[in-house]
């Protein structure tokens, strides 16, 4: 049986989000807002993110997997 786990956004996720957004702004490397939330959620939960979007590599501390 397949399982799906819901990952909730909370205050800690929001802190990761703001840290990422500020770091990207300082680097001059903006990425879409929704992708910042995805990256923040992955970092918060200690998950590997697999994506074809190269801009995720600009997020410090994000573990990326091969797609």
Image (spheres, rainbow, N blue to C red):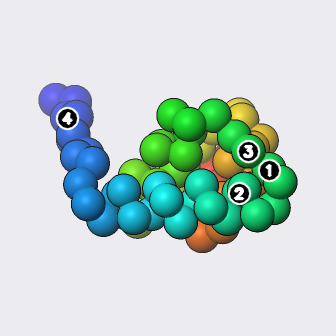
Q: Residues within 10 Å of mark 4 (few under 14, many from 20)?
A: few
Q: Residues within 10 Å of mark 3 (few under 14, many from 20)?
A: some
Could you tell me which secondary element the residue under label 4 belongs to? Answer: loop
1 and 3 marks in contact (CB < 8 Å): yes
Query: Earlier along the polypeptide chain: callout 2 or callout 3?
Result: 2
Give the left or right position of residue 33, taking residue 56 as reference: left
Q: Is residue 58 above or below residue 12?
A: above
Which residue has dot 3 on it?
Answer: 30
- Where does the image place residue 65, in percent across and percent down from the top left? 62, 52
- Where does the image place residue 45, in percent across and percent down from the top left? 34, 61
Which residue has dot 1 on it?
Answer: 29
- Where does the image place residue 36, in percent across and percent down from the top left? 55, 45
What count of labels does the image hold?
A: 4
Query: Earlier along the polypeptide chain: callout 4 or callout 3?
Result: 4
In the foreground, 28 or 54: 28
Q: Nearer the viewer, mark 1 or mark 4?
A: 1
Q: Residues within 10 Å of mark 1 (few under 14, many from 20)?
A: few
Which residue has dot 2 on it?
Answer: 24
Could you tell me which secondary element the residue under label 3 belongs to? Answer: loop
Q: Quadrant of residue 1?
A: top left
Could you tell me which secondary element the residue under label 2 belongs to? Answer: helix
Q: Nearer the viewer, mark 4 or mark 3?
A: 3
Q: Quadrant of residue 67?
A: top right
4 and 2 marks in contact (CB < 8 Å): no
2 and 3 marks in contact (CB < 8 Å): yes
Query: Earlier along the polypeptide chain: callout 4 or callout 2?
Result: 4
On residue 3, which mark appears? 4
1 and 2 marks in contact (CB < 8 Å): yes
What's the CA distance linking mark 1 and mark 4?
A: 35 Å
């Amino acid at each position: 049986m397949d399982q799906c786990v819901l990952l909730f956004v909370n205050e800690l996720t929001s802190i990761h989000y703001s840290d990422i957004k500020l770091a990207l702004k300082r680097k001059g490397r903006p990425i879409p807002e929704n992708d910042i939330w995805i990256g923040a959620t992955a970092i918060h939960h200690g998950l590997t993110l697999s994506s074809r979007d190269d801009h995720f590599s600009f997020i410090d501390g994000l573990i990326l997997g091969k797609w």
